[in-house]
Amino acid sequence: MIELHDVSRSYDDGSRRTTALPAVSVTARDGAVLWLAGASGSGKSTLLGIAGLLLRPDSGSVRLGGTDFTRASDAQRTAARRRLIGFVPQQPRLFRDLTAAQNVALATARAVPDPSALSLVGLAHRADSKVKTLSGGEQQRVAITRALQTGSAALLADEPTSALDDDNARSVLALFRRLADDGRCVVIASHDPRVGEIADDELTLEAANR
């Protein structure tokens, strides 16, 4: 479970202080999909970064799995992030000349890739295929597999369907739903209304008055 209470974030652009995320509270439950909705610039990615211990909020508190990380050191936050959280970026960021299995293995420091890891996302038959030969949806599923290799209880995804056609998008969203049904905490930051079809909870962010 991820609990955020009154978290906010702003940044200095050189001439003035700009609000990236007004104060907001939200809980992402284990076994459920939380949809962070809202237009571009509403703070979805910022809130996702705070939830994933990548960003420190200017105010408020951050709890993961019942532990308060609000004032934790950078080393403690890094260790917790590696142990508790899997990230799926908007772009898969895979090594195109390596196979799907090799890309997944990089997340585990295994010397020998384990093709069976890709069976979770229905890609065991593509384990030895180079990433550059995979479709956009297949690449996104490889990225999801890579994010799950630490055994993390929470999976955070930033606009995971933005570059996918309808069939691939629905396939990826169905996978997120299955992962939540298996007990994981899934948080998806997206303006894609199709996410609402699989979400248990929703938080719609409004662009700050900057």
Image (tube, rainbow, N blue to C red):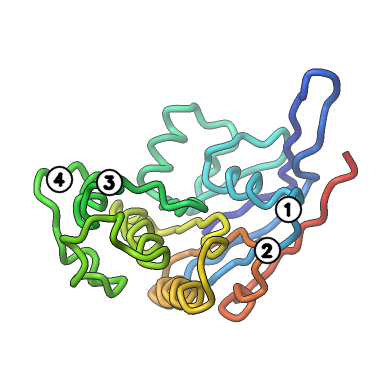
Residue drawn at 21 percent across, 63 percent down: 117
Cα–Cα gap, marks 2 and 1: 8 Å
Cα–Cα gap, marks 4 and 3: 8 Å
Residue drawn at 20 percent across, 50 percent down: 102
Q: Which residue is mark 1?
A: 40
First in sequence: mark 4 vs mark 2: 4
Identify the mark at residue 191; answer none if there is no mark. 2
Nearer to the camera, 81 or 143: 143
Mark 3 or 2: the one toward you: 2
Nearer to the camera, 170 or 200: 170
Identify the mark at residue 107; answer none if there is no mark. 3
First in sequence: mark 3 vs mark 2: 3
Residue drawn at 19 percent across, 63 percent down: 127
Pointer 1 local density, CA inside 10 Å: few below 14, some 14–19, many at least 20:
few
Q: Secondary structure at mark 3?
A: loop
Q: Which residue is mark 4?
A: 110
Cα–Cα gap, marks 3 and 2: 28 Å
Q: Secondary structure at mark 2?
A: loop
Q: Is the C-beta separation of discs 4 and 2 under 8 Å?
A: no
Where is residue 9? Give x, y as percent. Answer: 73, 37
Query: Going by the image, does 204 lie left or right of 193?
Result: right
Q: Is the C-beta separation of discs 2 and 1 under 8 Å?
A: yes
Nearer to the camera, 113 or 76: 113
Q: Secondary structure at mark 1?
A: loop
Q: What type is the residue that disc 3 sits on?
A: Ala
Mark 1 or 3: the one toward you: 1
First in sequence: mark 2 vs mark 1: 1
Q: Secondary structure at mark 4?
A: loop
Residue drawn at 72 percent across, 54 percent down: 25
Quadrant occupied by the C terminus: top right
Q: What type is the residue that disc 2 sits on?
A: His
